[in-house]
Each structure stands twice: as structure tokens, then as C-alpha cells.
Amino acid sequence: MKVRKLLHTRMRVSDMDQTIAFYRDVLGLEVLERKVSPRGSHLAFLAVPNSDELIELCSFPPSGPVKVQEDLVHLAFEVDNLDEMIQELTRKQIPITDGPTRTSSGSRFIFIDAPDGYEVELIERPPGTVLV
């Protein structure tokens, strides 16, 4: 027996509204649903363009603020044009924390920080590239 597919990845966040605003307004993700779980966690499910997998944000204030360890986890998103994305990030005053960097395969990437210190990698891949 094996799994069929990845459905979603959960990330705990300190401020749900701030985090939703980042993913919606900076990266263009769509909020599909917001709800409160039976134990009181505030949940939001975000859709990523051209992907079946969702990002689940979870805020549970009684457990305190989120502290993300450096280099522990990041999300990676493909973009069509990294230079245009950098211009858009600059307009929105989102600092680039690393890059742009070019890989041996010809991909280019940058990193930015989401709320709570989660890293977000934005990658432009040459046509036909499967992995970075």
C-alpha cells in the first residue's frame, strides 16, 4: 500500500490575518476556506495556482507565538519571470533575504520571509526543467 497524493501542508502561524494577507497579496494565493476546528484552532486553506495541494494555516493562540527555527522549513513556488517578481516585491516593500542565485541547471531563485520567519523560495526554471 502507498499514499495516493499530497493533499495539504499545515503551518502554524501567530497572526492568521497577517499571514493570509502575505500569501494572498504578495504571492497571489487564494483563500478557499476559513474555519475554527473543534479544539479551537483557527484554520485557513490556501490554493496555489496550478497545484492540487493546499497550504493549511493554523493559529492556536493559547500555545503562544510561533518560533520558526532558521533553515528548518520553506515553501518553494515557481514563477514565470524572476526579474518581474523582484520588481513587484520591491514595490510591495518585501525584502529579498537571499539571491538571486543561478543553479547549474539554469534555474534562478530568491528567498523572502513570510510572517513568523518562514522562508519562501521563488524559482524561475528554464523550460523543460523538472527539478531545481
Image: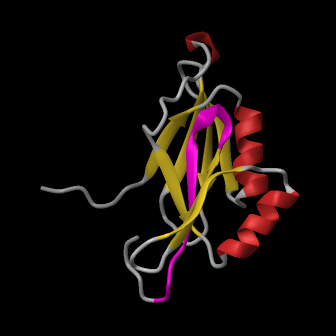
Q: Position of residue 101 (x, y in %)?
A: 54, 66
Q: Determine the residue positioned at 80% across, 65% down.
A: 88
Q: Quadrant of residue 117?
A: top right
Q: Quadrant of residue 15?
A: top right
> Considering only vertical position in the picture, is 69 above or below 111?
above
Give percent across and percent down for residue 102.
50, 71
Q: Residue at x 75, y 74 (%)?
A: 84
Residue range corresponding to the magenta coloring: 114-127
Q: Is residue 44 above or below residue 121?
A: above
Residue 84 vertical placement versus 28 (above, below): below
* Residue 117 belongs to the span the image colors magenta: yes
Q: Residue at x 70, y 39 (%)?
A: 19
Q: How is the image coloured?
A: secondary structure
Q: Nearer the viewer, residue 23 or 94?
A: 94
Return the x and y of residue 7 as percentages of the image width and height.
42, 54
Q: Work out whether residue 62 or residue 65 is closer to the camera in this orientation and state it.
A: 65
Residue 72: give x, y in percent of width and height.
42, 37
Image point (49%, 34%), residue name: 70
